[in-house]
Image (cartoon, helix red, strand yellow):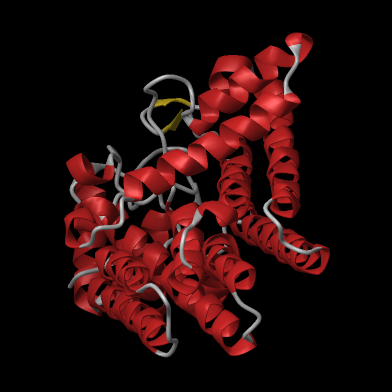
Amino acid sequence: MRHRECATGLYHVAVLASIDLDRLIADTEQEMLGVIERAEDERTRELYTMVRYHMGLDSDAPRGKRMRPLIGLLAYQSIAGDHAKALPGAAAVEMGHNFSLVHDDIEDNGTERRHRPALWTVWGTAQAINTGDALFTLSRMALYRLQEEGFDDARVLRLMRLYDETCLALCEGQFMDIWTSEHDEWESVDYYFDLIGRKTASLIAGSAEAGAVLATEDESVIGAYRRFGWALGLAFQLNDDLLGIWGDAATTGKETSDIATRKKTLPLIYALAQATGEDRARLQALLAQSEDELTAAEITEVLAILERVGAQEYTRAQAREHRDQALAELDSVGTVDRESMERLAEVVRGVIRA
């Protein structure tokens, strides 16, 4: 399952509050550039050119939505006020997310990332693997700057432990994903939720928890922000699953349906579990491992089966449920900065609005 960055229109809500998300993004990118600039030298400059290329930090290149660092900064700001002290943590989260994308593109043979050639297709597999490793290391180096911002050693150590546990969960999720793909296994719904919990929700939950850890020692508040991020991460992935089949290509940036590539997302997994008789046999035959993409006629067949078993409605209901759980967790905590809290709520509502 190729990890893509979902085009859900998260930031069209910017006019609803006075917090300048563009400033938070710009500040995070400046923090990341600082980490890179402190590391590079004349002989290794091309390595950091690769890092900037993948991160979209070279000129006006395409870049991701920076959702994960924004979640962390808004969580911190909602409790402690100004976001500036938390920027090293935001930079670490975004660089960590991107190291996983470099490796993911290689593992899934993905040739495009953010509407331009994937790193490995430009510099080769070996250099891309090394660049991903460098990004992981840079992400940890970013965390050291928290000490310069005045955070005590115990808090920085706690954050580093959280970060390492989160990265390990991400790798576990990727293992589960690759394993099922290589063995042509169609996992259960429960297995899929475990997989996306590790691969997607863990980093979003870790981002929110990190912001709270830096802002407060109240464990009940920290726990609420982690649960908020976990539920948001699941809703985010489930909405991505919906867009991958029923989304408009102009919005998602995907030219090929997840059905065509037999991508193992919740609607198809649910349909295989629920279909019976001829529908089940035909669906199994169509989704059997093959090098060829499904034809337009075959995609239409699959869509009809999904309709008959209610796969779209089930997936949307699950996304709504986790969205509502995320909102409930936000409602359970008091904050200093209500604008930041409201912006977090708008991000949640922006993931799935139906």
Residue 155 image point, x, y percent:
75, 68
Residue 76, x across and y down, in percent? 51, 66
Q: Residue at coordinates 71% horizontally, 64% vertically from top-left?
A: 159
Residue that protrudes farthest toward the top in the picture: 42
Horizontal relation, residue 198 to residue 227: left or right: right
Left or right of 33 in this view: 325: left
- Nearer-the-camera pick, 56 or 305: 56
Query: Residue 41, how many percent across, how many down?
Result: 75, 15
Q: Is residue 18 above or below residue 214?
A: above
Q: Is residue 166 visible?
A: yes
Identity of the residue drawn at 42% across and 44% down: 25
Residue 275 visible in the displayed image: no
Nearer-the-camera pick, 92 or 151: 151
Q: Which residue: 71% across, 66% down? A: 162
* Count of labels in the image: 0
Quadrant location of residue 303? bottom left
> Residue 173's x, y, as percent?
63, 61
